[in-house]
Image: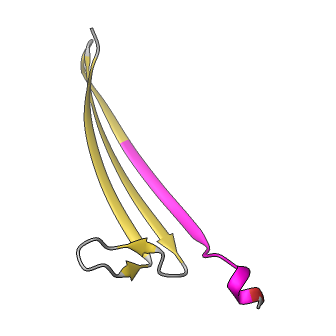
Amino acid sequence: IDACNKGANRMALSMGLSYLYDQNTTFKLEYRMDRANAPVFLDVKDGSYKKTNHLLGAAVVVSF
């Protein structure tokens, strides 16, 4: 019964870059990798669950 009360062990690694193009514009890029010891991340393509998840994000920040 103890196994039913224990969740998955998860970890995340995140890396980011930021580039100041000029005084008012910044480009940002971030990569994130999530891992778990159990399949807890939903794959929306086929509805299955996986042990890893990857995410890539980009942004342009403009201040005025």
Q: Quadrant of the N terminus?
A: bottom right
Which residue is at the far right?
Answer: 2
Q: Residue at x 57, y 69 (%)?
A: 10
20 or 50, which lies in front?
A: 50
**Start and end of the magenta stretch?**
3-16
Q: Would you say 50 lies left or right of 29 here?
A: right
46 in magenta: no
Residue at position x 26%, y 42% in the image: 58
Residue under the image location 29 percent in, 14 percent down? 63
The residue at the far bottom in this view is 1
* Residue drawn at (23%, 74%) of the image: 45
Residue 13 forms part of the magenta stretch: yes
Q: Position of residue 23 (x, y in %)?
A: 27, 12
Residue 4, image x, y percentages: 69, 85
Please, is residue 11 above or below residue 57 in the view?
below
Which of the 4 image quadrants contains residue 64? top left
> Left or right: where does residue 18 sit relative to residue 13?
left
Q: How is the image coloured?
A: secondary structure
Please give the count of numbered marks on the rendered protein.
0
Question: Residue farthest to the top?
Answer: 64
Horizontal and vertical percent for residue 46? 25, 80
